[in-house]
Amino acid sequence: MKKIILLVTLFSFSISVAQEGKNVAQEKIIEEFLTNCAQRYNYNTRMSDWQNCLDNGLAKDSTIAYLWQQKAMPYFKARKYEIGMPFLDKAVKYNAERWQPYRGFMKCIFSKSYKDAIEDLEDCKKKFGNQYVMDHTYDFYIAISYLQLNEFEKAEKILQNYVDEIYRDRDKLEHPTAYFYLGIAKFELKKFDEAIVIFDKALKIYPNFSDAKFYKAICLVRKESFEEAKTLLKESEEDYKIGYKLNEDNTIYETYPYQKKWDKQ
């Protein structure tokens, strides 16, 4: 029995050492072909040079998920989703825990493949739990996808749970974007009074939130509070023009669902 335990221990140790060696080797390849090669180039103007560096790294070891993701990333930013996605699929193949949630996010916000996003992120929840990707839980992006598929009741339920979870588990933190999309779900369900209450919660945290002001104003129009709505619409446009927009990092690359852009009437 002791011999068996010893053999298992030695086998596990050997695997651990081998994995550590592989990680060190892969880090060296990443440094050589990404840090010291690809990142010397601006992929917006020298995409082929960026990609060639990464291809040379992957020729050394095709299982490095991060290099596959780095091949995909600039294509997504250039809105060439069908070119970028197969590279991201490779990243997921070699490191699903890190890159499958990211792929679900990309499908939701960038390529706008909402059914695929839901499928990816639901699978992530089963495998990894409802963790965070790009500042929000998987459920947040699932809910946004349901909004875009006109399944408003599902979106409302998920977003309400998300808002409650943030408040309960993160020291009573309240997130204006989470409130905004919960307000949108209620707006789409014609629960205008409830939507206004939620938009007000977003505005309490982020007083110049132009998108929340816009949809609150639309709710007021539906309630025939025209003068108040007119004032709020004017404020929304003014706030937008001085930069008070939906506060998510990737809005620099993509328009988020329901984002109001006053310069694109």
Image (tube, rainbow, N blue to C red):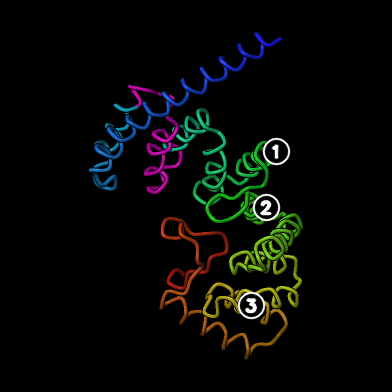
The residue drawn where x is 41% and y is 24% is 21
Say which quarter of the image contains residue 120.
top right
Majority SS type along the magenta span:
helix
Q: Secondary structure at mark 1?
A: helix
Q: Nearer the viewer, residue 71 or 133?
A: 133
Of the residues shown, which amino acid type is indicated by label 2?
Tyr
Residue denoted by label 2? 146
- Is 222 left, or right, of 237 in this rendering? right
Question: Which mark is on residue 156?
Answer: none
Neighbour class for label 3 at 10 Å: few (<14), some, many (≥20)?
many
Of the residues shown, which amino acid type is indicated by label 3?
Lys
Q: Secondary structure at mark 2?
A: helix
Q: Nearer the viewer, residue 242 or 40?
A: 40
Q: Secondary structure at mark 3?
A: helix
For the record, the magenta segment spans 58-82
Closer to the chain start, of discs 3 and 2, is 2
Q: CA distance from mark 1 to mark 2?
A: 19 Å
Q: Nearer the viewer, residue 61 or 123?
A: 61
Q: CA distance from mark 1 to mark 3?
A: 36 Å
Question: Which mark is on residue 126?
Answer: 1
Up the image or down, 54 lies above or below 146; here it is above
Q: What x and y, as percent, mark residue 244?
A: 47, 74
| Nearest to viewer (mark 1 / mark 3) | 1
Residue denoted by label 3? 216
Neighbour class for label 2 at 10 Å: few (<14), some, many (≥20)?
many
Closer to the chain start, of discs 1 and 3, is 1
The residue drawn where x is 66% and y is 37% is 123
Q: CA distance from mark 3 to mark 2?
A: 21 Å
Q: Give yes or no for residue 78 being in the magenta stretch.
A: yes
Of the residues shown, which amino acid type is indicated by label 1?
Lys
Q: What x and y, as percent, mark residue 37?
A: 24, 37
Neighbour class for label 1 at 10 Å: few (<14), some, many (≥20)?
few
